[in-house]
Amino acid sequence: FYDSSQKHKMLTSIVANTFNYAVGRGLDVEQIAAATGLQRTDLVDPETRLPEELAPTIWKLLGEAYPGQALALHAASAAPFSSLGQLGLAIQYAEDARSALEALVQYRSILSDRLSIRLVESDTEAILSVHHPVEEIDGGYGAEAGLAVLTRLGKESISGENPLVQVNFKHQPFGSLHVYETFFGAPVYFQQPDNALVLRRQALDRPTQKGD
């Protein structure tokens, strides 16, 4: 059973979303409980926090059960934006894309204590890079899910052409390259130095559809 006093935590809604996807794909609840100690009652309040290793442990189970599939993209395609907690609302209601990404960078610890997110702009591009130590457990599934959910949120919140120039991942692909590039609508590269969304810099000035 997991140690609830474990120092590093993650938003419960993220763990719950991963748990629900795993059960929906056919993983047995008892199998998940045996690996994590999680019970459904631990997931009732989405605003609480749980040990950070739980979600990646579930991803590892999924990867072992369904090899050769881009599971994280499938999960992200239907993940509720509420799984991002209050930060999800802050992103949706930001004035423009740049403000939305700056909020994500500033308040990233809402999602997970040790989540690292950086936004670096050049004359033509903006690079949003993401890193979390639990990648050592899940092999990159969490990074894929995170960037995929952010991409979906961006598409639904900001009008105009796809701002993505390319997408980078540190790990090897879990499924076919075609699946990845269809999802993101841009070239996707693996075994790169960082997990990152590379965007057209001018796209950051676009207003969000819900911004004041």
Image: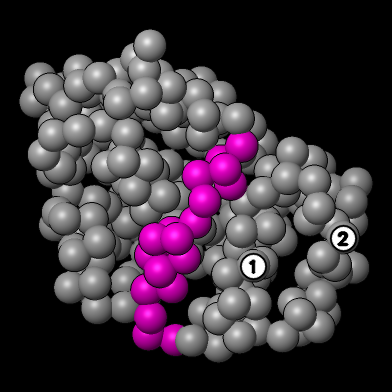
Tag 2 or tag 1, which sits nearer the N-term?
1
Q: Is residue 40 left or right of residue 96?
A: right
The image position of residue 50, as x and y in percent, is: 78, 49
Residue at which label 1 appears: 20
Q: Is residue 111 visible?
A: yes
**Residue at left offset 64%, top offset 67%:** 20
Q: Is residue 83 above or below residue 75?
A: above
Tag 2: amino acid: Thr
Residue closest to the far top: 212
Q: Is residue 197 left or right of residue 148?
A: left
Q: Is residue 135 above or below residue 178?
A: above
- Mark 2, other Cα within 10 Å: few <14 / some 14–19 / many ≥20: few
Question: On residue 121, which mark appears?
Answer: none
Q: Quadrant of residue 157?
A: top left
Tag 1: amino acid: Asn
Which is more toward the observer, 164 or 207? 207
Q: Quadrant of residue 197?
A: top left
**Residue at left offset 17%, top offset 73%:** 178
The image position of residue 40, as x and y in percent, is: 82, 65
**Residue at left offset 32%, top offset 56%:** 169
Residue at which label 2 appears: 41
**Residue at left offset 51%, top offset 34%:** 88
The image position of residue 132, as x and y in percent, is: 54, 47
Q: Is residue 38 left or right of residue 184?
A: right
Q: Which residues are magenta?
A: 67-85
